[in-house]
Image (spheres, grey):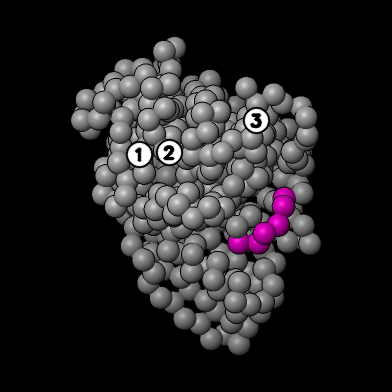
Amino acid sequence: MKILIASGVRHARDYVPLLRSLPGMEVIGCADTADSPFAEDSAALARTTGVPLLDLDQGLASCDIALVCSEPTRHVELALRALAADRHVIVDKPAATDTRGAQRLWDAADRSRGLLTAVHRLYSPQLVRARRIVDSGAIGLPLAIDAEWLAAGGLDGTTVERPELVCDPALSGGGELMNFGWYPALAVRHLTGLDVDEVVAFSSAAPHAPLFDGPHGAHGVEDAAVLSLRLRNGVVATATVARTPAGIGPAPVSSTLRVLGSHGHVLADEDAPSVAVRGADGAGVSRQVGGPAGVTALRRLFTEFRDDIRHGRTPLVTAADIHAAVAVVEAALSSARMNGAPVAPAVRTVGTTNGA
């Protein structure tokens, strides 16, 4: 599969060597729009990785897959260009910064011959094992989920290319809630199969001070947030997302997810990495599962999407999942701005976007 990096602004420096290590994958170049505010980033990526710097239309005409790695607020624009060219598309996270953009992606994916998915971590060995345990009925009916996603360190160029790509709403769409809320929103949906009916959220965004020193306060965005979700069938979930001064584990992101069931619970720890299960009788077992969650999840995401294309399969994360996750984050941002007022996530409407 020939892969085009559609804008080399975020995460592309990590994705290119990973893609090159996978069989059947060829990175043919990096391209961006002529009016991109970060054209030099794409040029720098091309220089440092040794791939051609292409015109966007030229690149789309030559590739099988477009991997969109721009600043988040341009994800939709570039993905729509690729879908209109009937290319398969992987959009970096978050795939969209609001539900209007997510709906435009969904509408375009319905018309395109290309498949659409987005970067996620549902293929981490720990979440894969947790899903199998839930599906097996070993813990009974899932009743409550608690998720935590904490980023280690600051925004010094080793974890994020530049601070404003997370903190400037014009580029990022928000703060850490926009940056990381995507992951627990997808995980809760993946493990339960349920839609979220209501979101209550509190964050450290202005007018409150950020919890930790850094550029979040200067841009008026949160470095930490807590969400409470009410799902269908009476299921509830909580999620904490934050960027902390020091990591709580060895990985850049420390993440855990616990599912409480009617007859037991399962804890997936991507930092350990391990999965622990305990039944109602008190008996429990804990096993080490897989290696580094982020790298392993990405590797499988790319290879599974390659096989989705080859075999005509539906990707694990679809346009509907993208819209649902973006809707939860959007509702959380609205709730936090209203001091925790409940907000219902937006649902897809028909015939309101032109997809352009």
Residue sitting at 74 percent across and 55 percent down? Answer: 231
The residue segment tinted magenta is 191-196
Q: Please name the amino acid that badge 1 sits on.
A: Lys
Q: Percent from the top left, x then y, of residue 92?
A: 46, 38
Residue 338 in the figure: left or right of residue 172: right
Asked which secondary structure carries label 3, the reply is helix
Q: Which mark is residue 104?
A: 3
Q: Nearer the viewer, mark 3 or mark 2?
A: 2
Most foreground residue, 126 or 257: 126
Q: Please name the amino acid that badge 2 sits on.
A: Ile
Return the residue found at the far top.
35
Most foreground residue, 303 or 220: 303
Q: Please name the amino acid that badge 3 sits on.
A: Arg
Q: Percent from the top left, x then y, of residue 161?
A: 34, 30
Residue sitting at 40 percent across and 75 percent down? Answer: 287
Residue 299 in the figure: left or right of residue 259: left
Asked which secondary structure carries label 2, the reply is strand
Cα distance in 3D space between marks 3 and 2: 19 Å
The residue that mark 2 highlights is 65
Most foreground residue, 254 or 303: 303
Residue sitting at 61 percent across and 43 percent down? Answer: 319
Q: How many marks are shown on the rendered structure?
A: 3
| Residue 14 appears in the picture as rendered | no
Pointer 1 and pointer 2: residues touching (CB < 8 Å)? Answer: yes
The residue that mark 1 highlights is 2
Q: Percent from the top left, x then y, of residue 67?
A: 42, 36
